[in-house]
């Protein structure tokens, strides 16, 4: 089984001492039922309309406060879960992008939790959550063209040995490690704060793994709880 060992800079504890996340590693198999993702996305949109996540408002408000602490403006650059849920509340639906992206977006929408999906084979070294010094490289798209920029000093970033893989904690993912259905080695990170019940974090992880295994029979998944002061494997 592929081993991925994400690390968290101790400085993160001062911003979000209760931060905890599920790290899910997947050895992929062939996709035999891409419709799993579309059904999950529809269920998630229905769940938002029905208000099925009573912790959602408090959880997303807590993320907004954390973003403010490291200088981000949450109204302009909200956490990924808030951006997705706002779109669903506005449009009532979410268009499909890619089966894997649609599946983890569905989990993010339904559980009001930022979820990232990465092609871990594209990483150089292990993922780490840390504060930027402002010189790191981040590859992105501008007007449809590849471009490079740097994060602001003090910004929370995910990175590897090459550069930034996600800016402003979970706001914008880079191009280099972006996940698609062609990836054979995948890493998912489900990020939560104490306002989300821990049992719901595990429920979200189980829902993602169940969807992946329905979509890709034979996929091998493992998950680990990580955080500023805890670690647990299931």
Image (spheres, rainbow, N blue to C red):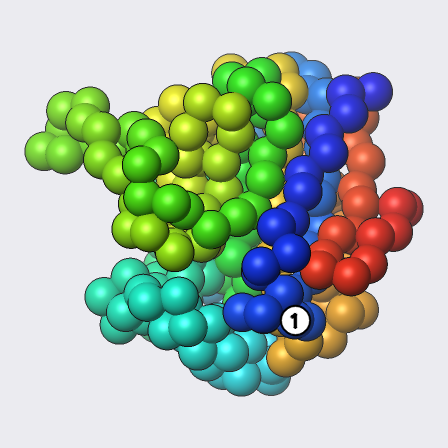
Provide residue 157's location: percent of width, then percent of height. 45, 47
Depth check, front residue: 14 or 192: 14
Depth check, front residue: 39 or 127: 127
Extreme-left residue of the structure: 143
Depth check, front residue: 120 or 137: 137
The residue drawn where x is 31% and y is 44% is: 134
**Observer able to see residue 120:** yes
Provide residue 124's location: percent of width, then percent of height. 55, 19
Q: Which residue is mark 1?
A: 17
Instruction: State whether residue 62 is above or below residue 170.
Output: below
Q: Quadrant of residue 185?
A: top right
Instruction: State whether residue 72 is above or below residue 95.
Output: below
Instruction: State whether residue 118 is above or below residue 132.
Output: above
Q: Quadrant of residue 27?
A: top right
**Observer able to see residue 204:** no
The residue drawn where x is 27% and y is 39% is: 150
The residue drawn where x is 49% and y is 42% is: 158
Provide residue 90's location: percent of width, then percent of height. 27, 70
* Secondary element at tag 1: loop
């Amino acid at each position: 089984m592929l081993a991925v060992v994400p690390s968290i800079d101790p400085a993160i504890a001062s911003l979000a001492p209760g931060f905890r996340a599920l790290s899910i590693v997947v050895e992929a198999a062939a996709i035999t039922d891409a419709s799993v993702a579309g059904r999950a996305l529809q269920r998630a949109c229905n769940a938002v309309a029905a208000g099925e996540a009573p912790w959602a408002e408090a959880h997303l408000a807590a993320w907004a406060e954390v973003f403010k602490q490291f200088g981000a403006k949450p109204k302009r650059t909200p956490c990924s879960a808030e951006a997705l849920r706002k779109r669903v509340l506005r449009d009532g639906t979410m268009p499909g992008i890619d089966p894997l992206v649609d599946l983890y977006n569905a989990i993010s929408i339904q559980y009001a939790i930022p979820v990232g999906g990465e092609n871990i084979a594209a990483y150089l070294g292990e993922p780490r959550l840390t504060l930027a010094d402002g010189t790191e490289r981040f590859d992105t798209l501008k007007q449809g063209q590849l471009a490079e920029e740097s994060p602001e000093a003090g910004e929370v970033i995910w990175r590897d040995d090459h550069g930034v893989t996600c800016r402003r904690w979970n706001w914008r993912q880079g191009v280099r490690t972006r996940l698609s259905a062609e990836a054979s080695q995948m890493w998912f990170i489900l990020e939560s704060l104490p306002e989300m019940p821990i049992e719901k974090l595990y429920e979200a992880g189980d829902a993602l793994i169940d969807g992946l295994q329905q979509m890709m029979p034979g996929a091998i998944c493992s998950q680990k709880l990580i955080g500023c002061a805890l670690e647990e494997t299931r």
